[in-house]
Amino acid sequence: MRVLVVEDEQVLSRALRRGLQAEGFAVDVASDGDTGLQLALEGGHDVVVLDLMLPGRSGVDVLRTMRGEQVWTPVLILSARDSDADVAGGLDVGADDYLPKPFAFTVLVARLRALLRRGAPPRPAVLRVGRLELDPATREVHRDEEPVALTTRETALLEQLMRRPGEVLSKIELRDHVWDAAGDDLNVVEVYVGYLRRKLGRETIETVRGVGYRVVGR
């Protein structure tokens, strides 16, 4: 398995190369964002270990560009930025995992192997269904390229539907993913579907009687 390590701390990058090679990985190393992005876009890597604070192009920009170019190689962010906002932001931009520094090397290897087992199915950074578009990172929603203002809960419900386009999701499944299953009645799903239809058009979400809802984005 080939790993791309994008890390500007020379001592750490050399240690990662030696350690990963000892674990049986083939390792390429880049010390700046521009070189890292070039290597990532060329393909041939099974997983990328990416720092966020890099010379030149930042790790976030590297990741955003990769996903924008439809490169779905699994990415593990390895960064000293360890706040909840940093972790959430990295995952929203398209990372598959996030490991704050300092870290245990055994944990890094275990997480890389877990990513390799999953493979790299397409996971678009921006969700598109029909005339609808939703960016999970910015929480922005557009219909026919026009912005639509949604509440946090409305956005969460729409995102859940758009992540599985064409599938019918039950009220129970939607409630359990968007609300506290123990504290909310199933009727809350119907109410919020109504809110979405008023803002996005009634035809954007279909009701499948006795089953649930699906987004069609008309």
Image (tube, grey):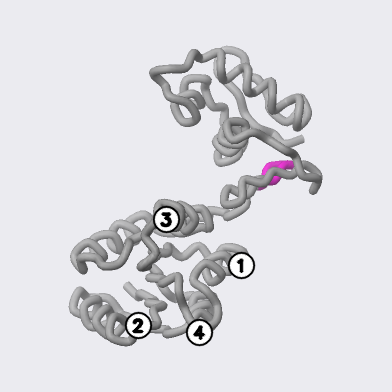
At label 3, the amino acid type is: Val
Q: In the figure, is residue 174 to the left or right of 132?
A: left
Residue 69: which numbered mark, if any? 1
Tell me the mark number nearer the camera, choosing from 3 and 1: 3
Residue 23, placed above or below residue 68: below
Q: CA distance from mark 4 to mark 1?
A: 16 Å
Q: Residues within 10 Å of mark 2 (few under 14, many from 20)?
A: few
Q: Residues within 10 Å of mark 3 (few under 14, many from 20)?
A: some
Image point 48% across, 26% down: which residue?
A: 179
Q: Which residue is mark 2?
A: 9
Q: Quadrant of the C terminus?
A: top right
Mark 2 / mark 4, whichever is N-terminal:
2
Q: CA distance from mark 3 to mark 4?
A: 24 Å
Mark 3 / mark 4, whichever is N-terminal:
4
Q: Position of residue 155 (x, y in %)?
A: 61, 36
Residues marked 2 and 3 touching at CB (< 8 Å): no
Mark 4 / mark 1, whichever is N-terminal:
4
At label 1, the amino acid type is: Glu
Callout 3: SS: helix
Q: Which residues are magenta?
A: 128-133
Residues marked 4 and 1 touching at CB (< 8 Å): no
Q: CA distance from mark 3 to mark 1?
A: 23 Å
Q: In the figure, is residue 131 to the left or right of 126?
A: right
Residue 87: which numbered mark, if any? 3
Residue 35: which numbered mark, if any? 4
Callout 1: SS: loop
Q: Position of residue 174 (x, y in %)?
A: 51, 26
Residue 136, placed above or below residue 193: below
Tell me the mark number nearer the camera, choosing from 3 and 4: 3
Q: In the figure, is residue 117 to the left or right of 126?
A: left
